[in-house]
Amino acid sequence: MIVATDASELPRLDDLAERAIANGVPGVRVVDSDELREREPYCQGIRALWSPNTGIVDYTQVSSAYARDIEALGGEIRLNHAVDGMQRFGKKTVVRANDNEYKAPAVVTCGGLYADRVAALSGAPASPVVVPFRGDYFVLRPDRRYLVRSNIYPVPDPKFPFLGVHFTPRVNGEIWLGPNAVLAFARKGYQFTNVNLPDLRTTFGSTGFRTFARRNWRTGMAEMERDLRKSSFLKSLQRYIPELTEADLLPGPSGVRAQALTEDGGMVDDFVIDVQPGILHLRNAPSPAATSSLQIGRYVADRLAEQFPEYRSDRSSVAAS
């Protein structure tokens, strides 16, 4: 349920509805405040976009299923292998990790928070640079889960760089509230106190980030306040569910978004894929990367097949790293 809480959001809501219908999203339609209240009794809004076929998954289980498929096809998964070198020699790419060398005709990288650094190992462009943003969630108190029946989202505002807080039922029955979005002081900065000076130098040394910060410092300060003050976080949630109280918000998990920024300070909101001979870098895969992962995989396989026609009938033969 994408909920408009004031009249200024209605044009954007209608635009979303038109695009959803044009893209063939099944069953999607605009509902008035009465039907919104019928479907979400504790949610306030003047109009909403209802998508009855939107679902949720446990992505840990999805990843585990992918891993089983890889191993069933003869692949190996090697964890805790930091890649520190990558170079093309003739028809092979050599990848160095943990003092080992791995050779393959084709290499695919999807480095997440380190995507720009991994890509640079093979001589790919330094831009777009990855800037980490931490998002903190609260978890709704179990005896108050009746307040939320489905995914509840705000209407996206193109003037602001992030989606804003939303309400997310989980497969295990939990309901997550959030997130906020604050600059992380480390690429693995899952807590406010995590600081990595080399990561900070990369962030503040980026022309794109400095431009982004000048444009969005007010939003950044508001997000920081929500990060430090539970009452501010609650206020943003009460815009949709007024009955929430501070006692309803239990400590929850945090995530770090690997956000790519352009040189002019723009947030890259689509997938960035660099192709070199025998090497393909997935440089930016923001939400909905998990949802789109199967389609991204097909796209990657097709791009590699253009370089390696002999693999078109047997995609599993293309090695991936």
Image (cartoon, grey):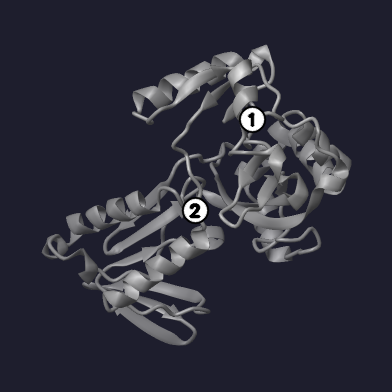
Could you say which is closer to the camera, residue 292 or residue 94?
Answer: 292
Residue 236: percent from left, percent from top: 77, 34
Tag 2's secondary structure? Answer: loop
Read off the residue under disc 2.
57
Between 124 and 158, the one nearer to me in the picture: 158
**Hey, what amino acid is under mark 1?**
Glu
Residue with the most extreme bottom position: 99
Q: Pointer 2: residues within 10 angstroms few (<14), some, or many (20+)?
A: few
Vertical relation: 300 (above or below) 315: above
Q: Which residue is denoted by mark 1 in the rendering?
A: 40
- Which kind of residue does numbered mark 2 sit on? Val
Q: Residue at x 87, y 47 (%)?
A: 247
Distance between mark 2 and mark 1 Cα atoms: 21 Å
Query: Residue 121, position in %: x, y?
Result: 45, 67
Instruction: Estimate the x, y position of residue 3 in percent, counting from the top left.
Output: 62, 25
Name the foreground residue: 255 vs 112: 255
Q: Residue at x 51, y 63 (%)?
A: 60
